[in-house]
Image (spheres, helix red, strand yellow):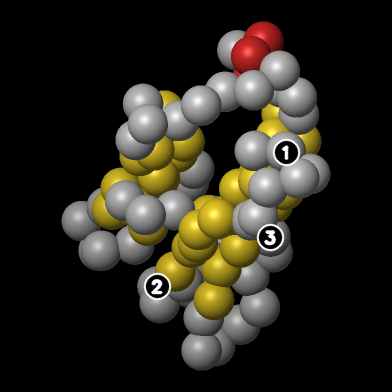
């Protein structure tokens, strides 16, 4: 298994909700988190991955958000999971 966590932005509105997508390699489809970790306000603050196969390539992660009141800045990064 693998857990990825994040924090809401310091200026994020109360209704901000976050979503994580990842791609294990460029050959794979992008996948949304299937099991979110939630805070006391039911906001997604992490993802718990089950049965993850870590390949010797770079994986792509994207966390984006939505809010009815404002734009939420996304965060993305390429990570070599086999080096963690």
Q: Pick whichever, 31 or 75, lies toward us.
A: 31
Q: Helix, strand, or loop for circle 1?
A: loop
Disc 1 crowd, CA 10 A, few/some/many (<14, 14-19, 20+): some
Sequence-wise first label, 1 or 2: 2
Q: Residue at x 45, y 30 (%)?
A: 52
Q: Position of residue 15 (x, y in %)?
A: 40, 77
Q: Position of residue 26 (x, y in %)?
A: 79, 44
- Mark closer to the observer (1, 2): 1
- Residue 60 in sight from this viewpoint: no
Quarter of the image that includes the C terminus: top right
Instruction: Tell me, for residue 25, which label it has, or none.
Output: 1
Residue 77 location, quadrant: top right
Residue that carries the numbered disc 2 in the rendered image: 14
- Mark closer to the observer (1, 3): 1
Marks 2 and 3, Cα distance to the nearest angstrom? 17 Å
Marks 1 and 3, Cα distance to the nearest angstrom? 20 Å
Q: Residue at x 61, y 48 (%)?
A: 22
Disc 2 crowd, CA 10 A, few/some/many (<14, 14-19, 20+): few
Residue that carries the numbered disc 3 in the rendered image: 74
- Residue 29 in sight from this viewpoint: yes
């Amino acid at each position: 298994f693998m857990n990825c966590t994040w924090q809401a932005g310091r200026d994020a509105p109360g209704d901000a909700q976050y979503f994580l997508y990842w791609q294990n390699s460029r050959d794979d489809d992008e996948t949304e988190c299937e099991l979110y970790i939630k805070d006391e306000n039911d906001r997604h603050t992490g993802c718990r991955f089950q049965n993850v196969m870590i390949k010797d390539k770079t994986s792509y992660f994207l966390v984006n958000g939505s809010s009815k009141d404002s734009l939420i800045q996304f965060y993305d990064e390429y990570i070599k999971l086999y080096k963690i």
